[in-house]
């Protein structure tokens, strides 16, 4: 199936427009390079679209079988947050930045060291 993006948005910077859907793109987001390559890279080493919005990226990842139907995406900034964010909530849960979710106070993080053989 060929996807023909409509021209929906005209903004000042090329990265402000998704190359796939033509809609607005977050001004600054990224996916880890191995994930980006698995989703976006063609067999010849080129990318079909240089800039895509997070919605299109998630749709392409699902269409290519890179993610499953239960994938939960975590949007988190690398920098620029100018307020203090809590690391615990009123229920005593603690924020786990590695998993990008709240953990119950009694939950012990699972750590895998090496392999069982």
Image (tube, grey):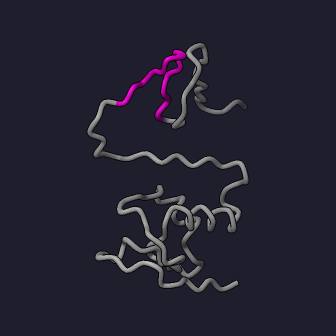
Q: Residue at x 71, y 63 (%)?
A: 65
The residue drawn where x is 62% and y is 83% is 3
With respect to residue 8, does 60 lie above or below? above
In this view of the protein, which residue sits in the foreground, 26 or 49?
26
Q: Position of residue 59 (x, y in %)?
A: 63, 65
Instruction: Please identify the quarter of the rendering in which residue 58 is found.
Output: bottom right
Say left or right for 42 vs 22. right
Specify the segment rendered in magenta: 85-97
Q: Position of residue 29 (x, y in %)?
A: 41, 58
Q: Position of residue 94 (x, y in %)?
A: 50, 22
Give x and y (percent) for residue 28.
36, 60
Q: In screen coordinates, is 104 left or right of 98?
A: right
Q: Main secondary structure of the magenta part?
A: loop
**Between 99 and 34, the one nearer to me in the picture:** 99
Residue 79 is inside the magenta segment: no
> In the rendered image of this protein, does residue 78 appear above or below residue 4?
above
Residue at 53%, 77% (x, y): give it. Answer: 20
Is residue 91 located in the magenta-colored stretch of the structure?
A: yes
Question: Quick one: quadrant of the C terminus?
Answer: top right
Judge by depth and name the residue closer to the eye, 22 or 2. Answer: 22
Q: Where is 83 relative to 90, above or below?
A: below
């Amino acid at each position: 199936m060929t996807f023909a993006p409509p021209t929906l948005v005209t903004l000042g910077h090329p990265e402000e427009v998704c190359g796939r859907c033509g809609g607005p793109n977050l001004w600054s987001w990224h996916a880890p390079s191995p994930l980006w390559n698995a989703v976006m890279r063609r067999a010849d080493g080129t990318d079909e679209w240089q800039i895509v919005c997070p919605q299109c990226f998630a749709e392409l990842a699902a269409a290519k079988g890179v993610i499953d139907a239960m994938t939960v995406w975590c949007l988190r900034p690398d920098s620029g947050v100018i307020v203090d964010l809590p690391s615990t909530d009123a229920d005593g849960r603690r924020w786990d930045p590695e998993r990008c979710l709240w953990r119950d106070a009694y939950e012990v993080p699972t750590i895998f060291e090496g392999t069982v053989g």
